[in-house]
Amino acid sequence: MKLVNLFLIVGLFLISSVATAQDLKFGHVNMQELIMELPEKAEADQKLQAEAKTLQDRMRMMSEEHEKKFRDYIAERETMPELIRTTTEKEIQEIEQRLQNYQNMAQQSLSKKEQELYQPILEKVQQAVDAVGQEQGFIYIFDLSSQVVLYHSDQSVDCGPLVKAKLGLN
């Protein structure tokens, strides 16, 4: 009798776990596609390009200064006294060092600006994905653009349209 009850309990447990497993909902979305469709992304791109152009223009001016100094040095080095030649070579090296430092600082500045501009966009999309996940009862929503998903079946729901609706995109 105890054995029959044990089998009944185990059987009920297995049946309930199978029924629960069938209720699991998985979804997927392509975050890159969603972000590319947002008007905020285009605006952020424009601001980032403007910042990059400003930095490039300044770099070009510094490079032109370096080139002029170097050309003048090459043209006159044979006739320059030793002291002036040495001083000019040091000046050219200092300009090259400034160029290198400026380039490094410009890259850091551009990276910081990029993060500053894109972070609110990423947060907005993540909030929309979270809201869709909660509203639709998904356990997981995978990002297809990250290429982490190893298998994708037809049973996974494409959450892209739901997230687009949440973001106000058509």
Image (tube, rainbow, N blue to C red):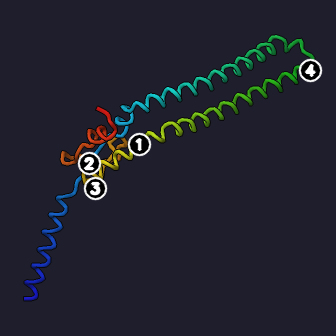
Element type where label 3 sits in the image: loop
Tell me which amino acid carries mark 1.
Answer: Lys
Mark 1 or 4, closer to the camera: 1
Residue at the disc numbered 2:
27
Q: Quadrant of residue 128?
A: top left
Mark 4 or 2, closer to the camera: 2
Q: Name the residue rendered at 36%, 40% in the picture.
A: 31
Mark 1 or 3, closer to the camera: 1
Q: Is residue 12 depicted above or below 48 in this figure?
A: below
How far across and how far down the image is residue 40, in percent? Answer: 43, 32
Disc 4 to disc 3, C-alpha distance: 76 Å
Tell me which amino acid carries mark 4.
Answer: Glu
Tell me which amino acid carries mark 3.
Answer: Ile
Element type where label 1 sits in the image: helix
The foreground one among 37 and 66 is 37
User: Label for residue 82?
Assistant: 4
Quadrant containing the C terminus is: top left
Residue at the disc numbered 1:
124
Q: Answer with mark 1 or mark 4, whichever residue precedes in sequence.
A: 4
The foreground one among 168 and 49 is 168
Q: Is residue 137 depicted above or below 52 in this figure?
A: below
Circles 4, 2 touching at the beta carbon (< 8 Å): no
Q: Answer with mark 4 or mark 2, whichever residue precedes in sequence.
A: 2
Quadrant containing the N terminus is: bottom left
Residue at the disc numbered 3:
139
Q: Is residue 15 left or right of residue 136?
A: left
Q: Is residue 8 depicted above or below 73 in this figure?
A: below
